[in-house]
């Protein structure tokens, strides 16, 4: 299948996710991100009052949107979308102006403090181009994360999307996110206080509801 006919996406099945943070660690190791920032992180919500308390979680990463607002707003065109749908950042063109960070509805971009440029999850495009899975998908011990070509009706991800109800973050923004969730908790999907203690607890957050 020609590359321009591919459309890469990810499904995250919360029924399988155990919030082990393996995806966060694998991403950090693969992308060599500095300690204080993350391209993939775990949102954790605590609901209820003692002793009836439950925790819910939601792995977070760039949605690689079909209609990416960040790409439209980048003044240097450093942010662009590949033919297969992966949204990239050209580190040689990025000037660190943060326009894309301000325009991203999903709080998934960050300034690399060592390079002073914006970075994010690229679905591990370098691995995908080599015929490999993204690091987070390959590392997930419960196979909660599935990655593939949604334009291929025979692919695992297409079959999962066809047989399961899924939700996306902030559908009302009409960006057509390409990260789909199964059985995600409504509070965990909420945009309220997305990153509390971003610099002190960059790998995850805790909300009490």
Image: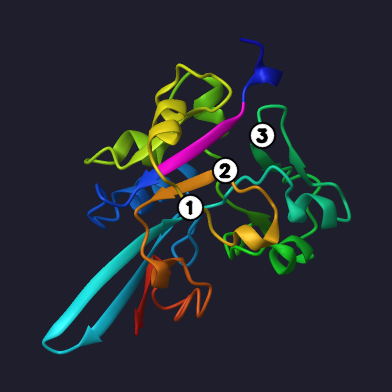
Q: Are marks 2 and 3 in contact (CB under 8 Å)?
A: yes
Mark 2 surroundings: few (<14), some (14-19) or many (≥20) residues within 10 A: many
The spot of residue 168 in percent (x, y) is 52, 53
As drawn, is 101 to the left or to the right of 153? right
Q: What's the magenta region?
A: 7-11
Horizontal side of 115 relative to 161 (left or right) equals right
Which residue position is annotated with label 1? 167
Q: CA distance from mark 1 to mark 3?
A: 19 Å
Of circles 2 and 1, which is in front? 1
Question: Foreground: 142 or 34?
Answer: 142
- For mark 3, what is the residue? 85
> Residue 56 is drawn in which quadrant?
bottom left
Q: Secondary structure at mark 1?
A: loop
Q: Nearer the viewer, mark 1 or mark 3?
A: 1
Q: Foreground: 78 or 36?
A: 78
**Do the numbered discs 1 and 3 sit on residues whose CB atoms are within 8 Å?**
no
- Mark 2 or mark 1, earlier in chain: 1
Give the distance between the C-alpha atoms of the residues marked 2 and 1, in whole angstroms. Answer: 10 Å
Q: Which residue is mark 2?
A: 178
When the figure is inspected, residue 57 is found, relative to residue 20, above or below; the finding is below
């Amino acid at each position: 299948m020609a590359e321009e006919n591919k459309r890469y996406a990810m499904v995250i099945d919360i029924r399988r996710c155990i919030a082990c943070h393996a995806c966060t660690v694998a991403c950090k190791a693969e992308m060599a991100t500095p300690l204080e920032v993350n391209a993939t992180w775990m949102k954790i919500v605590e609901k209820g009052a003692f002793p009836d308390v439950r925790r819910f979680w939601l792995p977070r990463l760039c949605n690689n949107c079909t209609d990416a607002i960040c790409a439209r707003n980048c003044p240097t065109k450093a942010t662009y979308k590949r033919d297969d749908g992966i949204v990239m950042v050209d580190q040689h063109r990025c000037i660190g102006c943060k326009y894309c960070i301000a325009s991203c509805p999903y709080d998934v971009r960050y300034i690399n403090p060592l390079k002073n440029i914006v970075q994010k999850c690229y679905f591990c495009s370098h691995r995908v181009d080599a015929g490999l899975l993204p690091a987070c998908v390959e590392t997930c011990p419960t196979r909660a994360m599935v990655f593939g070509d949604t334009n291929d009706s025979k692919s695992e991800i297409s079959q999962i999307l066809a047989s399961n109800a899924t939700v996306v973050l902030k559908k009302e923004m009409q960006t057509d996110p390409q990260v789909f969730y199964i059985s995600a908790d409504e509070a965990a999907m909420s945009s309220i206080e997305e990153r509390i203690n971003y610099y002190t607890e960059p790998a995850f957050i805790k909300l009490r509801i």
